[in-house]
Amino acid sequence: MAAQDGGDEVRMLQSLRGKIYDAKHLIPNKMRDFFCTINLDQEEVFRTQVVEKSLSPYFGEEFYFEIPRTFQWLSFYIYDKSVLQKDLRIGKVAIKKEDLCNYTGKENWFTLQPVDSNSEVQGKVHLELKLNELITDNGSVCQQLVVHIKECHGLPLINGQNCDPYATVSLVGPSRNDQKKTKVKKKTSNPQFNETFYFEVTRSSSYTKKSQFQVEEEDIEKLEVRVDLWNNGNLVQDIFLGEIKVPVKVLRNDSFQAWYLLQPRENGNKSSKTDDLGSLRLNICYTEDCVLPSEYYASLRNLLLKSSDVQPISASAAYILCEVCRDKYDAVLPLVRLLLHHHKLVPFVAAVAELDLKDTQEANTIFRGNSLATRCVDEMMKIVGKHYLKVTLKPVIDEICESPKPCEIDPIKLREGDNVETNMENLRYYVDKVFREIVRSSISCPTLMCDVFYSLRHLAAKRFPNDPHVQYSAVSSFVFLRFFAVAVVSPHTFHLRPHHPDAQTSRTLTLISKAIQTLGSWGSLTKSKLSSFKETFMCEFFKTFQEEKFTESVKKFLDDVSSTESKEPSGLSEPVHLKEGEMYKRAQGRTRIGKKNFKKRWFCLTSREFTYHKQQDKEPIFTIPIKNILAVEKLDESSFNKKNMFQVLHGEKPLYIQANNCVEASEWIEALCRVTRCNQKRLTFYHPSAFLNGNWLCCKATVENTVGCARCTADVPADTQIEIDGDRETERIYSLFTINMSKLQKLEEACGSIAVYQGPRKEPDDYSNFTIEDSVATFHTLKQIIDTVEKLNESHEKYQKKRSSSAEYGSEKNPIGKVS
């Protein structure tokens, strides 16, 4: 387990998770092919599969990713897929970053808004504003406005490329509109303008020349500075990129500078109808964690880690956390990761599973609900079992997706010309192959999963001593139903495939998943069970599986994965497959700069080597052994005027790579850094820009092999399979306790009442849904939680005060900001 906790610095970390459910009443009102994307401002970071021929497409896709940069808007776009033309954007859901907290953890229907270029903005502009008083030759006083537009950051891509931005700077009032314009900056999303403009605000009392404007002192109250950003279209129309407005009256005689977030035009969307585009159902959970130095979390961390030792388990801090959270998943995710990180998960799962079993009355319903125990095991398998799934299922899933055979056996869904007998043979071939790979995979099952399965098996046998099958169903309900079957039906979610399978392949995978669930259910292959199938076609299909070898194979596999005996480490000799995907790389050794220098390639990272290929599943055309990688760092956008670039430094020339978006770039850099952290020859310094035209763009050194001019970034976790930031998970748990403080206090009060009055409860209380087995022990833990959280509150408040005094953004409410 990677031992990563934070250092001495405060870190601000963002993440987003949730689910895109479905859309309804979409326009145009006819059967079309739809997909949905997630965008940070204008940058696409996630895309669903295409749902074919639908008016109300169901996507049903979960998402989770770290957000590596600042953003203003989180947007969801619905597209109408086109084969020959550009995909058409039907509508969008756009939520301001500061409003995301209103939707966290809730399932909501959002009305689609029209996509209007005037409202599609991102980025920020750095301005310095000053109001000067000038004395004229005759001694009278007039005022002059000075606008220094310094730079912009994070402007959007235009047609996938950096834009050609320029700015217009205007002084606007009831009867005037003075406008000036900067020079156009070529191919950059972070233009450096550094241009100053001067505007006359009031005239001296002796000014008599008649002019278009006659401005008096009181008109300052009505004047504002407006800065508009545009993309220079050359031969086509310029594209609006955003604007900001600052009232002149706030300046007076002071000089201010600030970063201002670009805003959409005020008239954007107003003329468009918003009630007839359809709606989209989403569940969104955005988190922003302020992670303090590690020592601040010692008390809360220790309180959580000793949970498995608390008797009863319902009086432990970890159990109470899950009790007070409205959505248990919010608590389970950071809790499981923290306990994994500190090797405390197995005893905690055993304790909560034992409590779960007390309420289970029938053996055939064991571990079938969404209890705390089942959710903890589910999350553990997702984290620990990534590599296990890949070595077991990826080859056969690749075969199914790349050489699909028709497998539909539902007579209602058969296509014209399909033969149900042939399809059944194809499906049987795939099911046999997947099943065979699973039951032969016990040697690769992670030890931690085996330890958990061992505990569950023996707890189940103890609870139902007269049922010989329950010890197997306790394990199969997880490893078959909740692990392998789920991965088969959603291979892209578990990184078994880089892209979503098409509709026909998805249907095939669904049928295979159903078959695996049934085969894995110990004792289900009996005539009485077959008669209970909802679909008669599945009943007919499973009649061919009534063979002793299937049930015996399942039994042997479940015995193996729930054993604590040590396994031969043969699986460890195989390279761990870490990440793969399509990106762009700059041709090695060329000096000519331009688009032709960058080629699309398929990249693959394992624990042994980093390779790229002309296409997926082709032989590598370039290989870097992991031991030869010296550093992995971001590359300045100015090097090639391209966003989301990073460099892999090794023995030869640097390998320059462009990812498709900021999330993808961050994930690749983290994965590469993690697997190379222990390399003995890692660099301490590197060049943040490229070596072009005989010099390094960053430091202007002319010798290509000169030592770098910037220090390499901090170390990252060394473990190649599981990376866990213990401090961040503890911070997340602290936030959950803070949000639910009123529940904690009510529960504490209830425990005190129960301890004093030991009689039966006469009527339901606020705490009647909570498990209080031992009121004294629970009260003691609650007091510790509340005291610890209050101390952390003080530490966070001190940091927030320090942060707010050092950096702010300009805005309409607070038009002038400070910069540190």
Image: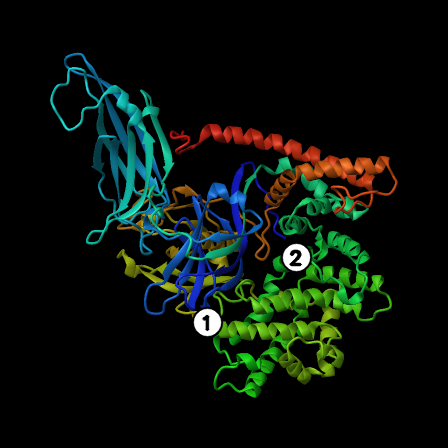
Q: Is mark 2 on a helix, strand or loop?
A: helix
Query: Which residue is denoted by mark 1 in the rendering?
Result: 617
Residue visible at 61% across and 38% down? 294
Residue 465 showing in the rendered view:
yes
Residue visible at 12% across and 19% down? 208
Identify the image quadrant of residue 207: top left
Seen in the picture, residue 463 relative to 338 is either above or below; the reply is: below
Task: Find residue 380 and name its label.
Answer: 2
User: Which residue, as the protein is rendered here, is positioned at the far right?
Assistant: 759
User: Which residue, as the protein is rendered here, is positioned at the far top?
Assistant: 139
Badge 2, how many Cα within 10 Å: few under 14, some, many 20+? many
Seen in the picture, residue 711 relative to 381 is either above or below; the reply is: above
Identify the image quadrant of residue 616: bottom left
Quadrant assignment for the C terminus = top left
User: Which residue, as the protein is rendered here, is positioned at the far left?
Assistant: 209
Colour scheme employed for the rendering of this structure: rainbow
Q: What element carries label 1?
A: loop
Q: Where is residue 343 in the image (x, y as percent from the top left)?
A: 69, 51
Please state if 733 lies on the left or on the right of 69 as rendered: right
Badge 1, how many Cα within 10 Å: few under 14, some, many 20+? few
Residue type, numbered disc 1 = Asp
Please state if 704 lies on the left or on the right of 195 as rendered: right
Residue type, numbered disc 2 = Met
Seen in the picture, residue 19 relative to 246 is either above or below; the reply is: below
Q: Where is residue 313 in the image (x, y as percent from the top left)?
A: 78, 48
Which is more toward the observer, 697 or 505?
A: 505
Residue 661 showing in the rendered view:
no
Dot placed on the residue nearer the N-terminal end, 2 or 1: 2
Q: Position of residue 265 (x, y in %)?
A: 33, 42
Q: Distance between the residues labelled 2 and 1?
A: 30 Å
Please state if 62 lies on the left or on the right of 55 as rendered: right
